[in-house]
Amino acid sequence: MTVTVGHPVPDFTATATGDTTVILSALKGQQVVVYFYPKASTPGCTTEGGDFRDRKTAFDAVNTVILGVSRDGLRAQENFKAKQAFNFELISDKEESLCRLFDVIKLKKLYGKEHLGIERSTFLIDAEGRLAREWRGVKVKGHAEEVLEAAQALHQGA
C-alpha cells in the first residue's frame, strides 16, 4: 500500500530525534510536511533542511509540522539536526517502512553504479490526515518555499 493524493495517509509510528516518537494520528488537526532526503549531512540534504528550518516560523503560522525522513540511524539524525540547528524533528527510517509507504525508494545511478536509494520527495498532509500534495524528484532550490506556499493555501482553504 502506498499513499495517494486525496486519500487518508495510513497511520504510522516512527522513531525521531529529540527522544520522540512520531505518531501521525496524534498530529490530526495540524498539517504535516513529510520530506524525504537521501542522506544526512550531505550538501543537498543540508541545504534542503536549512531551507525548511529558515521557514519554520511561517509553517508554524499555518499550523504545519515539518518532519524530515531518511534511512540514516538515529545517532546520525541527531548529529545532523544539532549541527544544522534544525528546529524540527528528523525520523530514522532504517527499516524503510515509511520509505515504502510513500514509495520513495528508487533505482538510482551514482558514478555509473546502480543502487536503491531515496528519491528526494515531499508530501503535504492536511489537518484531517489526507494527502493533499506530493512532490517527487525534488530539486532543492526553491522547494521549501513552494511547499510553504502550498501549506499556506491549504490552511486558508481549511
Image (cartoon, rainbow, N blue to C red):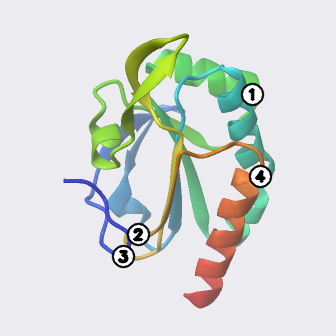
Q: Residue at x 28, y 47 (%)?
A: 101
Q: Decide which of 95, 143 is in the foreground and name it.
A: 143
Q: Label 4's element?
A: loop
Which of disc 2 and disc 1 is earlier in sequence?
Answer: 2
Q: Do the residues bearing badges 1 and 2 touch, measured as CB atoms within 8 Å?
A: no
Residue annotated with mark 4: 142
Structural crowding at the residue carrying mark 1, measured as other residues with C-alpha within 10 Å and reported as few (<14), some (14–19) or many (≥20): some
Task: Tally the marks.
Answer: 4
Q: Amino acid at mark 4?
A: Gly
In this image, 55 relative to 92: left or right? Answer: right
Q: Do the residues bearing badges 1 and 4 touch, measured as CB atoms within 8 Å?
A: no
Spatial CA distance of label 2 from label 4 is 28 Å
Spatial CA distance of label 1 from label 2 is 28 Å
Residue annotated with mark 2: 28
Residue 115, position as x, y percentages in the image: 38, 18
Q: Residue at x 35, y 24 (%)?
A: 94
Where on the picture, by quarter, is residue 7?
A: bottom left
Structural crowding at the residue carrying mark 2, measured as other residues with C-alpha within 10 Å and reported as few (<14), some (14–19) or many (≥20): some
Which of the two discs, 1 and 2, sits closer to the camera? 1
Q: Amino acid at mark 1?
A: Gln
Q: Label 2's element?
A: loop
Q: Label 1's element?
A: helix
Which of disc 4 and disc 2 is earlier in sequence?
Answer: 2
Spatial CA distance of label 1 from label 3 is 34 Å
In this image, 114 relative to 42: left or right? Answer: left
Which of the two discs, 2 and 4, sits closer to the camera? 4
Residue annotated with mark 3: 6
Which of the two discs, 1 and 4, sits closer to the camera? 4
Spatial CA distance of label 4 from label 3 is 25 Å
Q: Residue at x 60, y 46 (%)?
A: 138
Spatial CA distance of label 2 from label 3 is 16 Å
Q: Do the residues bearing badges 2 and 3 touch, measured as CB atoms within 8 Å?
A: no
